[in-house]
Amino acid sequence: MIDVSVLYSGLETPSTPHRYGREITQIDPPEHQKMAIAKSASERRPIVVWNITRTCNLKCVHCYTDSEAKRYPDELSTEQCKAVLDDLADFKVPAVLFSGGEPLSRPDVLELAEYGRSLGLHVVLSTNGTLIDAEKAKRFVELGFAYIGISLDSATPAIHDEFRGKEGAFDKTMRGFHHCVDAGQKVGLRLTLTRQTARDLDQIFDLIEREGINRACFYHLCPAGRGNNLISLTQKETREVVETIFDRTHDLNKRGKRVEILMVDNHCDGPALYLKMLKEGNPRAQQVLDMITWNGGAKNSSGVGISNIDFYGNVHADQFSMYRTFGNVKERKFSEIWQDTSDPIMAGLKDRLPLLKGRCATCRFKNACGGGLRARAESMTGDPWASDPYCYLTDEEITGEPVGVTDDENRTPASVAEPAK
């Protein structure tokens, strides 16, 4: 994850101390939004993405958990979840992100959030927004949610509804946004970049500004669950999309609109931004390279600074790696599972740079990018240490030297293969 607003526009956000190890001096966010200054990226405790339930009231075409509107057996009980929260608080994780399925379809999710807050945990909710009414939005504020992330696939209702598998989803989602904004709850937009959604980016940015949305996260696609069936962007299309996000973010903040724009799950975005700033003669280019190198990109992400607990209590390196489990919180504490490196993949994730292959192994930005998303590399090639097929940097950019002309910019990432067992 890179924070484009911080890197390109010099904005400070409550996450800056955690993400880039820098103290904030220009803002004083509310206590429940503050994150501690990390001494080093590699020593950070993991943010926990917790799929608290698989049940969902929609049927989205890109759902990595393949969720439906039905009850799934064997999910963790309220008391089991509270025991996990006790452990996460003792382990001093920086944040717990309740996800799903649709987390608001779980009756006790706000009870769990309240319990987590009583332990001092930084709590976030990732939702499709359709179940948020005025009362829930007010409750979010009372409980001290750091922010509410709401998924929106398009500023065009018909496109969003098609992605979400339900007519009228757009209107309900927008009502959810409005209720959060009206209640004074920090709210973020979440969008997965695909061929369909990428066409609508300018309209999405217009909507962000018009609706007073505080934050937006743009996720590069990781083929998983029903997302296996989506058509990926080509390298050229991805680069164009990334440039649009960079430019629109800079424009927003230049005009005094304090909007946090983040890009997620394609760690070459950081080097791409550095190269853009270098080309523009931006005096902060070197500072940005230093910041993304401190952060480390993927090398301090999945399996290190990002983790996942699924609806059954299984622990994964991230939410896209559910094909591999390192243990279950019903049997062992999360903190014990996370620090156990007896599994060679977990050990490798915690020190992955020597294991990387192909373009990732020889890239001059390896310490800033960290080799891209391992779940995507493995799901698409069968090799957990292969190059990330979604890297859109040219060979010349990763070597720093002119090379022969390639067809990289127009190729579509490799077809999806079964993940290695």
Image (cartoon, rainbow, N blue to C red):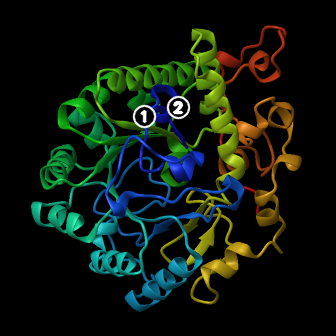
Give the image location of residue 43, x and y in percent.
69, 61
Amino acid marked by disc 1:
Leu
The residue that mark 1 highlights is: 11
Q: In percent of the image, x 44 and y 26: which residue is there?
A: 245
Give the image location of residue 249, x and y in percent.
40, 26
Q: In percent of the image, x 27 and y 34: which residue is there?
A: 208
Looking at the rendered structure, the secondary structure element under dot 2 is: helix
Amino acid marked by disc 2:
Leu
Based on the displayed image, in which of its 4 quarters is residue 387 positioned? Answer: top right
Q: Is 55 placed left or right of 37 in the picture?
A: left
Q: How busy is the neighbourhood of tag 1: few (under 14 within 10 Å), some, or many (20 plus)?
A: many
Q: In percent of the image, x 28 and y 39: which residue is there?
A: 160
Q: Which mark is residue 266?
A: none
Residue 220 shows in this picture: no
Q: Is 150 placed left or right of 83 in the picture?
A: left
Q: How busy is the neighbourhood of tag 2: few (under 14 within 10 Å), some, or many (20 plus)?
A: many
Q: Is 342 placed left or right of 270 in the picture?
A: right
Placement of 128 over or under 407, stated as above or below:
below
Viewport quadrant of the C terminus: bottom right
Looking at the rendered structure, the secondary structure element under dot 1 is: loop
Which of these two is toward me, 203 or 178?
Answer: 178
Give the image location of residue 377, x and y in percent.
71, 45
Q: Which residue, as the protein is rendered here, is positioned at the far front?
A: 25
The residue that mark 2 highlights is: 7
Based on the displayed image, in which of its 4 quarters is residue 278 positioned? Answer: top right
Which of these two is toward me, 330 or 148?
Answer: 148
Viewport quadrant of the N terminus: top right
- The answer to whether marks 2 and 1 mark residues whose Cβ atoms lie closer than 8 Å is no
Q: In percent of the image, x 45 and y 81: which residue is there?
A: 75
Which of these two is toward me, 206 or 386?
Answer: 206
Residue 69 shows in this picture: yes
